């Protein structure tokens, strides 16, 4: 049997471990890299090797960042009284992208998942409570923006209950669920449709 | 604006340079890697860095390999009189996979492409002629197995003409083109269909 050089096969095996990349795609990627020069290969391998270097988590909002506190938490022009609770750092970055959100974030670091042993103590919920208790920050509203999935909704429910009990004065909201822009009523799933109807607003 | 740590952004940029990987997929891959430990990250980056290490080209058939001559060319149990001409090393590996091909290969290293300045001198055609001239090898048949694309067909035509002129005794064949297994007549393109008809065989 004709085999690939071992260094190529090793690289293919490594690429094939990545999610969504099968052996065929891995092969294609490695053959593409083979055509790149040593400088480019080095840039790539260095970027992977140093991936975690300098990555810290903001001690206030737990977002992945280069500096602690993160630029959002230390920015005096952001509304520190408005906190958007998300599952992961990427969610915060996505919410921040349109530029319309002026508040700050709180990254839970995951979702409740009893099957995988992830209970409330594994998420940054206690730290959220401390932030709200800290009157210097003056938090007035908490928007829960976990994903509209089973785990995300369960987590949203849990966090909202904890906060309601402890801080009855706090304004507590949930990000709207409904039809996505460019979506098609005909192809929307039933849950999205019923949430879109429930969430209807007056003109 | 909330930004990713610079080391992450750099890795995302590197992944996004790969073919078929957009910024979203790159982000997903990097976040997946972020959850792997240092040993795994190192294995990946080393595999990329050392990609080209030890890769040589067989001086006889020009396939990418670990040793020269390659295991196929030096294997006494392979039929050295039967040579399959392919575009790239990967094509040889694909043809060898089913295990039914018993001959050896000749990798052209590409296809004729006048637009990109790839003429016959850029391909390993002269080296194929020398192999056939070498009576010790005793080559009896050459199967041309370039891809059924415009460039592949042009290259096949060119190689077949060169060999026919020089070696009128040589058996020269072209790999069959027709309907792929599991294919559907209804959805086959016209060229495939007409080739399949032309290539029909008696029962």
Image: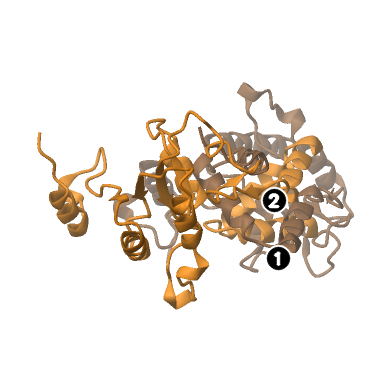
Chain colours: A brown, B orange
Relative to A150, is B108 above or below?
Answer: below
Residue B75 percent coordinates (x, y): 53, 32
Quadrant of image for the C terminus of chain B? top left
Residue to which mark 1 is pinned:
A102
**Disc assigned to residue B52:** 2
B97 or B101: nearer the viewer = B101
Residue A28 percent coordinates (x, y): 53, 50
Q: Quadrant of residue A67?
A: bottom right
**Is A73 placed left or right of B119 in the picture?**
right
Whether residue A107 can be seen here: no
* Both marks 2 and 1 on one chain: no
A21 or B161: nearer the viewer = B161
Q: Residue at x 79, y 48 (%)?
A: A49
Q: Chain of mark 1?
A: A
Relative to B78, is A142 above or below?
Answer: below
Q: Residue at x 69, y 27 (%)?
A: A118
Q: Are marks 2 and 1 in contact (CB under 8 Å)?
A: no
Whether residue B77 can be seen here: yes
């Amino acid at each position: 049997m004709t085999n690939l050089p071992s260094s190529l096969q090793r690289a293919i095996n490594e690429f094939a471990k990545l999610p969504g990349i099968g052996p065929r795609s891995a092969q294609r990627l490695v053959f593409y890299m083979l055509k790149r020069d040593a400088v480019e290969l080095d840039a790539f391998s260095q970027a992977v090797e140093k991936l975690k270097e300098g990555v810290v988590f903001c001690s206030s909002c737990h977002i992945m960042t280069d500096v602690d506190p993160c630029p959002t938490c230390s920015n005096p022009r952001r509304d520190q009284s408005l906190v958007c609770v998300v599952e992961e750092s990427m969610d915060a970055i996505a919410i921040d992208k349109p530029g319309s959100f002026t508040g700050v974030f709180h990254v839970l670091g995951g979702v409740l998942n009893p099957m995988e042993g992830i209970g409330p103590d594994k998420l940054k919920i206690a730290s959220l409570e401390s932030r709200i208790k800290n009157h210097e920050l003056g938090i007035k509203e908490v928007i829960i923006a976990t994903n509209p999935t089973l785990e995300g909704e369960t987590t949203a429910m849990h966090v909202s209950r904890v906060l309601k009990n402890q801080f009855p004065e706090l304004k507590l909201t949930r990000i709207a669920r409904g039809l996505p822009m460019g979506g098609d009523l005909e192809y929307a799933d039933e849950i999205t449709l019923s949430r879109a109807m429930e969430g209807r607003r007056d003109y």
